[in-house]
Image (cartoon, grey):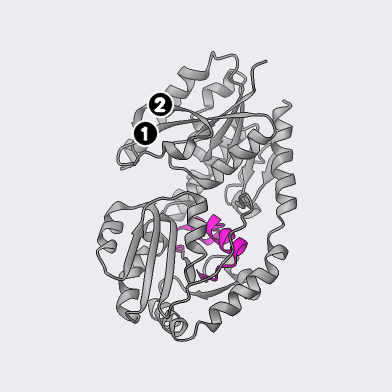
Amino acid sequence: MLKKKLFIINTSDFPDNVILSHANYAKEVGFEPVFVFPSRLSSINYIKFYNRYEYIRLNFNFNNSSYLNYFLSIAKLTFYISYIFFFKPNAKHFLAIDFPGTISCVFLKLSGKLIHSLINDNFSARYNIPYSIFIVLSFFESLTYRIISNSCIFPDKTRYKLIKFFSLKNIFFINNILSDTKIKYVGNKKKNLIVMFCGLLIPSRGLELLLDIIKLTTKNIEFLLVGEGDKDIINSLKINKRIKYISYVSRHKNLKLMSTVDINFAFYSPKILINQFAIPQKIYDSIMIGCPLFINSEVKMSKKLLKLNFCFTEKYFDIFSISKKLNELVKNKDQLRKISKSIIANSRNYINRNKLEISVLNFYKRIFEL
């Protein structure tokens, strides 16, 4: 008997740990996940991160360097997805990642395929654009999910409200909380302070502030960058002696690194709407292992985390207050130890892993039976 395959449509082979986690849950209920993605012009080879899964590499480069190239790349993605799967009888279930993945399945929907959208990133809210353009894009985004998607997964209700022009079918709210880990926070025992930036390394996630922060902080404060992103800014930063850069690593390795730093820096520029509603995996990972957090106050989830004594907060562009706090922490690490103890003592009240796993497994069991 042929296994039911779940084709995961994405615009990149970048090993997003949330998507890989969904693939793992789908496999647990009986699906055989198959990743489908094009190449990227400047990406490194991430295939080693897919060794548990089958994958299909599409024969073109996805280029988002301009609006025109982005539009043409989505058109190419739609063509390839339609050509490969439209008449394929054993291709019924598709997990489309975000708006580009979903719209590329438009013709598959016409042929009776089942399209399930995993909406980690609201397309209309991810850019610094005028509000009038955001309204137009969010209307079109909502309409796309309404027409194409048989079900939609959002990480939080706030993300759904951002594009709620149309009532979508079969909505599920599943947080970006991945499988549990036995790794626990031990911290940095030395006198220096190590501040970690991890995940997608781009200017709007705090890197644009880093050189100014370095100028305003003492020399025994060091910065660890772990991940991939804007190569120009990464290359300009890593030449600084106080910055160490490590390219993309597995989630396990990332957690090991996180467990040995002093604090995890999670800043998201409020100029981009979706950043105000950020629900990042690295914050959940910090809470899971007990690593102290530094979050900008414009991120809405920071308010609850601050009340729980899980983090420090400052405004995103207030580099003087950010630097002052880091200078205080290197002199007195007891503040960090208190934060870590608070996280370890109360993390189960914030992250209900049993409830999450039941929700995500029930979702994949439900679509497996369709």
> Where are the magenta residues, as a range?
268-294
Q: Is residue 341 left or right of residue 108?
A: right
Quarter of the N terminus within the rendering: top right
Observer-nearest residue: 100 or 330? 330
Tell me the CA gap for discs 2 and 1: 7 Å
Task: Answer whether labels 2 and 1 touch (C-beta < 8 Å).
Answer: yes
Q: Amino acid at mark 2?
A: Leu
Q: Amino acid at mark 1?
A: Ser
Q: Is residue 118 left or right of residue 226?
A: right
- Disc on res. 39: 1
Quarter of the C terminus within the rendering: top right
* In the depicted structure, whether residue 280 falls above or below residue 6: below
Within the image, what quadrant is residue 345 found in? bottom right
Residue 36: tell me if it is visible: yes
Percent position of residue 359, x then y? 73, 45
- Disc on res. 58: 2
